[in-house]
Image (cartoon, rainbow, N blue to C red):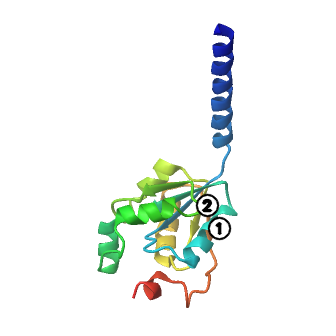
Amino acid sequence: MILREYTNQARIFVLDLYIRVVQAFMIKVLVFGVFDGLHEGHKFLFREALKHGDKLIVALTPDELVLMAKGHLPKFSFEERVEHLKNADHISEVIVGDAQFSSWHILDKVQPDVIVLGYDQKELEKDLARHIKEHGLDFKIYVASPFEPDKYHSSLINK
């Protein structure tokens, strides 16, 4: 009985160690967004992002920042948007985005290997490039291609 318990404990230890080693070598990809009602364009972004890594982390914009940036709250609450993302394919983790614009604390928290931006995130791309240059950071940044932007864009769908 003692030998069996030891063997099970050893198996658990080895499995835990294996998982930690695999996770240490996974390429983390970070995407940003409001994701107010997931649509095919968002799903395309997630698939494109995963072409650049193994673990997709979504930084979800808090309601307060959406209100400041767009002049209105999202159609879905923050909690609802989190649930929609957690139920979506390809996403490993959903985290709260920064509480203020241009702070970029999220980069320290996540330490991504790759950042993938949506085709329509031009201002975010400029601000991110500025921050990376000012702080001497080294992230690979990709901008995803649009997926039927005349059909799948949140500003059109949420009218």
When the figure is inspected, residue 7 is found, relative to residue 141, above or below; the finding is above
Q: What element carries label 1?
A: helix
Marking on residue 90: 2
Residue 61 appears in the rendering:
no
Mark 2 surroundings: few (<14), some (14-19) or many (≥20) residues within 10 A: some
| Residue at figure coordinates x 43%, y 61% from the top left | 82
Q: Where is residue 88 in the image (x, y as percent from the top left)?
A: 55, 64
Q: Name the residue under label 1.
A: 47
| Residue at figure coordinates x 47%, y 49% from the top left | 108
Q: Are marks 2 and 1 in contact (CB under 8 Å)?
A: yes
Q: Earlier in the sequence, mark 2 or mark 1?
A: 1
Residue type at mark 2 is His
> Which image quarter is the N terminus in?
top right
| Residue at figure coordinates x 52%, y 80% from the top left | 120
Marking on residue 73: none
48 sits to left or right of 64: right
Q: Position of residue 75 (x, y in %)?
A: 35, 76
